[in-house]
Image (tube, rainbow, N blue to C red):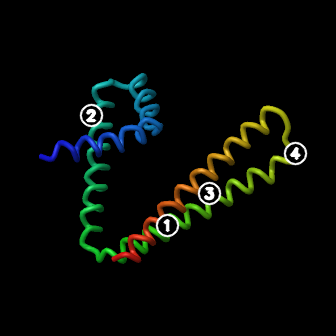
Amino acid sequence: MDWQLSLLTFALIFPVELSDKTFVAAHVLSTRYHPAAVWLGVGIAFGLQCLIAVSAGQAVSYLPEWIVSVTSITLFLVGAVVLLRAALLTVSGLAVLAGRVLLRYLRLSLLHYFAAAVCLLFAGVGVYSLATV
């Protein structure tokens, strides 16, 4: 087993899963039902989710690289457009807001701009890797 790959996978997935709200649902269910039954259900559901994700990733590996690259570039560009539109709508709606609420939405739009920039960066990397193949 490749332990470096396992550690890298853990390091990439763990922070993303921390913000996932599934643990809240598991906590609420365990306060109402037997915790062992909830733990078993969560474990099976997560295992099935991982099995589907790994199987889909393996299936994608059989496609030609250019198809995967073009698809990922397209998805990142669509994500950037959606995030930019959300940021612009948030900023345009700010004209009527004031005070603390204004700052909260301003921070949210900055987050959308940052996420859109990351999507555009990934799309650019995809275009570059596709052009150098």
Find the distance from the CA under tag 4 to the CA under tag 1: 36 Å
Instruction: Classify mark 3: residues with Cα within 10 Å, few (<14), some (14-19) or many (20+).
Output: many
The local secondary structure at tag 3 comes to helix
Asked if residue 129 is positioned above or below residue 22 in the image, the reply reads below
Q: How many marks?
A: 4
Q: Earlier in the sequence, mark 4 or mark 2?
A: 2
Q: Residue at x 67, y 47 (%)?
A: 110
Residue 83 is tagged as 3
Residue 40 is tagged as 2
Residue 132 is tagged as none
Q: Are marks 4 and 1 in contact (CB under 8 Å)?
A: no
- Residue beneath label 4, please? 96
Q: Residue at x 63, y 51 (%)?
A: 112
The local secondary structure at tag 1 comes to helix
Q: Amino acid at mark 4?
A: Val
Instruction: Classify mark 1: residues with Cα within 10 Å, few (<14), some (14-19) or many (20+).
Output: some
Asked if residue 29 is positioned above or below residue 79 in the image, the reply reads above
Left-right relation of 117 to 130? right
